Amino acid sequence: MELLRKRRIALSSLFFLSGLCFSSWASRIPDVQLKFSLSDGQLGTLLLGMPMGSLVALPLAGWSVHKFGSRAVLLISGLAYLFFLYLIGLSPSLLILGLVVVFFGMVGNILNIALNTHAIGIENEYKKNILASFHGLWSLAGFSGAGIGAASIYYGLVEAEHFLIVGFLGVMILIFSQKYILKEAAPSGGSGFVLKKPDDLLLRIGLVGFFGMMCEGCMFDWSGVYFRKVIEVDPNYVALGYVAFMGAMAGGRFVSDALTNKIGKVKMLRISGVLIGLGLVVAVIFPFVTTALIGFILVGLGTASVIPLSYSIAGRSTMYSPGIALAMVATISFFGFLLGPPLIGFIAEWFNLRVSFALIAVMGIVITILMTIRPAVFEIKEGQADI
């Protein structure tokens, strides 16, 4: 049990590393825009490189984890993630920067699949839900990365110097962790070919992830805009909604596992969908600072469990190996992250932002519906009682 605890701590530190890399890049995006004199449209095109790289990497991620095991893939991709982060800071031209951002997205998603595959293995050994706590550390790293970024800007560090510091911290984490990240047994079943049609379980849970990621993406990109245009807060406080959402999502992930262990994954996802829908309805019907903050906190609590539990259920597929199953569900889910924010913009253009957020409220309720219709789909043959 002591070794298992050390393995959990080691993997937690790697989830933290992943979140730290992502948030470090995000914290310097305004500086990158200024450095290359990019218009908002040009910046949007540059930023599209990361999700596109992530999407392209998904089949490779599933195959590599299935072929070589999650330990080798997550250690190599973790080092590569730090390397490409540093290259972003060194990029001398917009063309090179664009290529590096694409590879940064690719390596980041390979790391993501490897981390979650290994986490599911540890979760199985614990015989209880612990996956959400790993994701909570990823979210916590987001705040840490933003803080390091703010300090780097304050002390006048250029991007390369900032990312070199993060790289040093990351290498220390990798050195510490590798001793306790054990090589798992080779997969005994499941296909190694990721481009097959998912079964009913993976398709259903993939759709749950799709709508969950759509809600997350919209809150990431549009919460500040909502507070500025709809709530009409002082310009100094437009980030309040984003902070409320992110704080609730991070905190929710640390308590999600304990609650899920009591009521089961299916019920937890039903509640999550209701919380997302209710929170956005409150923010839309009562567009005031206090009520909107309450609404965004509810949305954060609702989204906290969706992706961790979706991955946890997918990893128990009896038809595919965990790496392949995760890649399938992540692929379906990721389209929600890509489509959600632009959809909000289009609907806001045709109607208004409140109508857009009302639509996302419906997406939350759809999660509850998907987990309610034919719940027998989620009854894993291994007899997992917590599902």
Image (cartoon, grey):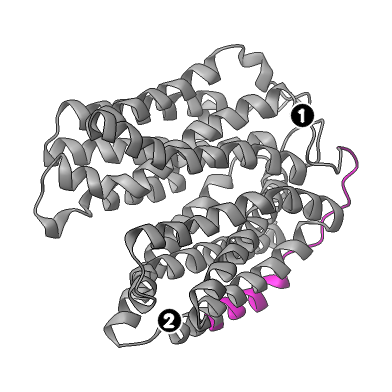
Identity of the amino acid at label 2? Glu
Element class at badge 2: helix
Q: Determine the CA span between mark 2 and mark 1.
A: 42 Å
Magenta segment? 168-190
Q: What secondary structure is marked by label 1?
A: loop
Find disc 2 in the rendering and name its residue: 159
* Left or right side of 95 for 219: left
Q: Which residue is mark 1?
A: 197
Q: Position of residue 133 (x, y in %)?
A: 52, 50
- Where is 329 relative to 180, above or below? above
Residue 222 % position (x, y): 31, 45
Return the residue nearer the eye: 29 or 165: 29
Mark 2 vs mark 1: which is more N-terminal?
Answer: 2
Kindly identify the amino acid type of the residue bearing the numbered disc 1.
Lys
Mark 2 Cα-neighbour bin, 10 Å: few <14, some 14–19, many ≥20:
many
Residue in the image at 61% along x and 15% along y: 375
